[in-house]
Image: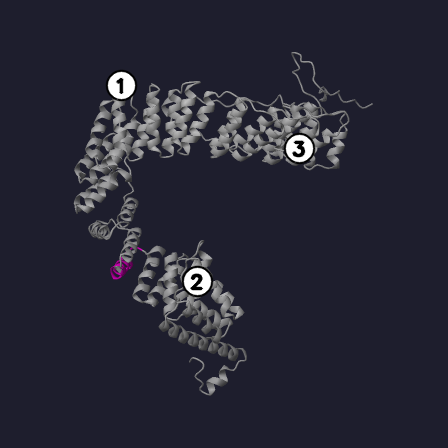
Amino acid sequence: MPSQPPPSTTVPKTFNFFSGHRKPTQNRPTVRGGIFSNRQTLNPNQNHQQPTTNFQLEKWNPQQSITTPPPQPPSSSQHFFAVAQTLSPIARYIVDSFRKHKHWGPPVVADLNKLRRVTPKLVAEVLKVQSDPNISSKFFHWAGKQKGYKHDFASYNAFSYCLNRNNQFRAADQVPELMNMQGKPPTEKQFEILIRMHSDANRGLRVYYVYEKMKKFGVKPRVFLYNRIMDALVKTGHLDLCLSVYNDFKDDKLVEEGITFMILVKGLCKVGRIEEAVELLGRMRKLCKPDVFAYTAMIKILVSEGNLDGCLRVWQEMESDKVQPDVMAYATLVTGLCNGNRVEKGYEFFKEMKGKRYLIDRGIYGSLIEGFVNDGKVGVACDLLKDLIESGYRADLVIYNHLIKGLCNVKHVSKAHKLFQVTVEEDLRPDFETVNPMLVSYAELRKFDEFCKLLVQMQGLGFSVTDDLVKFFSLMVGGERDRVVTALEVFDNLKPKGYCSVPIYNILIGALHKIGEVKKALTFFQGLKESKMEPDSCTYSNAISCFIEIGDIHEACSCYNEIKEMSSIPSVDAYVSLVKGLCKVGEIDDAFMIVRDCLANVTSGPREFKYVLRIIHICRSNDANKVMDVISEMVEDCCSPDDVIFCAVIAGMCRYGTIEEGRKVFSSMRACKMLTESDLVVYDDLLIDHMKKKTADLVLSGLKFFRLESKLKAKGSNLLPS
């Protein structure tokens, strides 16, 4: 008899599922049972110990960032189970049914009908975690139709929160009407919820809408809710509505609180109605005296609105109330006065602070120094720097930048350089804003050796000298003609030392073109081409405008082709110049090919080009009146017709219309004084020549189609080119 195998010593795992709560024991923690369970099966053979490493202090780098894998967004199932852990078993069952079916329908209703009963507490629990407003609404109404069921305030509130959370706030505003229809008149709490929702989202008009609905239901707000409504209206800029709510507040014979007055006063200050704000302060004093925080808030609002006279008026009211201003009140006022070009008045309050031995913030010093520098009083600004250092502060880079700029403005560039040395010694890491005033001063004073020494020093400090020079030349040529000349002299001195680049050439070529020095700009362009540097699309774009201005259309087209070979796009100005140049020499087809290329590559092309295509398209009707309607619309759009528009009429009529209709368009433009008599003759001849050219092209195309070229050549026809 064969031997039987020994019995297995392993006991198969059994999984027990519990319904409801289980009594906790020492070995079994509490489990919320039901269809879903949060238990996890762990493998006891797994080693969960993390590998440890010995920490060595000498190898620790505080600047090294800890590399951690980026957190992965949780999936929908993970999110569901994370939410389900906080729900009761029946609520988990309902939410999971929504998750599985995704839409309200018979399967969801069948799952819900399996439940014995649904309570308002359960409805509120489900709605608190629902993210689909459609399913939430269907479920809410389904629950209300159950026999013996009535919604309570908790379920209504949860429904309102659910709708608002899913951006259905307009539907949430209709919940009070729903409550009233179902025999549950809304209380102040329901309206407070809606008001708080709209207030947090800065929907002031919606807050007022809910308030008006409160009055229709005969619900009178408390003082707290009145304050909330008025504050929301003030923050969203609806002061008139706020004052109307305040009138209702007084009609209800409620007593104002300090916060009530402050809401109204801040709203009045924001719109500059200072007299009314002061009058309201007088009424506030009968109930409670405004403190320094209230006055500081008013001053801060007036400073943000730029109403400095109102700030000083409120300050006088604060002094008349014998309220002692603190450091924050002084700092707010002084900073506002300095930013509003009233630095002398701000300096008076600064001295008042020093007389009271207040701790003056470095920001106040910085505002005063900036104000005095902008006012041209650099000496006072330097005295403030000494006072700042004697007070135990360390000036920051912004303060030094303002002082360096002020010293350079009064031609004390040597002192400015000393301050620059201070910034280097104190390791403040000066930037381009620090050195640019000195570079400009050296250039204007023609101290080019000092200019180059500063560049060498900048390079030693780690500056990107090439990029900074591009910024310098951009700022220099943006002013008057003399500054452009100065920039050219600087470039002539820097070029032998190797401080030149293609962007600098582009800036100078563009600046010379703007001041009318076209030939000199083209000289720079030729010099760039002869050097070892390669011109870019910006260089060729500037050159196109220059060549068009001197009438060299062939070189302009060559530059355009160079840009296309670089797989780049010309500038809009270059497109416009080239199209106008081609239209002047009668190359209409090439001009409109470039128009289409511009509109295809440029995001916001010239409006004139858009009208060009529209005119060509409207010429299909062969109606001069319709073409004139488009031109009149263009004139109303502040886009005066020029050579490009005239050539568009010629191109459109020669392709789709007739010479007679084209002449009618030009006659109508002459009657509207858009054309002179001489221009009318010129464009009439151009219309005829272009029509002849189009006719000849059509004849040649027909001959090629019927393969008659050889017969014409045999007869010596001159119609075909040799």
**What residue sits right under mark 2 in the picture?**
595
Circles 3 and 2, Cβ within 8 Å, touching? The answer is no
Q: Is residue 19 above or below residue 451?
A: above
**Residue identified by numbered label 3:** 136
Against 502, is 278 above or below? Answer: above
Give the mark nearer the N terminus: 1 vs 2. 1
Question: In this orientation, which residue lies closer to the viewer: 331 or 535?
Answer: 331
**Label 1 belongs to which residue?**
357
Query: Residue 577 falls in which quadrant of the image?
Result: bottom left
The answer to which quarter of the image holds residue 408 is top left
Q: Residues within 10 Å of mark 1 (few under 14, many from 20)?
A: few
Residue 712 picture location, percent across and down: 48, 85
Cα distance in 3D space between marks 1 and 2: 71 Å
Mark 2 residue type: Val
Residue 424 is covered by the magenta coloring: no
Between 426 and 8, the residue placed more toward the observer is 426
432 over 555 or under it: above or below: above
Callout 2: helix, strand or loop? Answer: helix
Tell whether 605 sits left or right of 373. right
Q: CA distance from mark 3 to mark 1?
A: 63 Å
Towards the viewer: 472 or 213:
213
Q: Is residue 600 left or right of residue 675?
A: right
Looking at the rendered image, the disc whose residue lies closer to the viewer, 3 or 2, is 3
Of pointers 3 and 2, the one earlier in the residue sequence:
3
Q: Quadrant of the N terminus?
A: top right
Mark nearer the viewer, 3 or 1? 1
Q: Residue at x 31, y 35 (%)?
A: 340
The magenta segment is: 518-533
Question: Taking 316 as reference, is 167 above or below it?
Answer: below
Q: Residues within 10 Å of mark 2 (few under 14, many from 20)?
A: many
Which amino acid lies under the numbered mark 1 shown in the image of this protein?
Answer: Arg
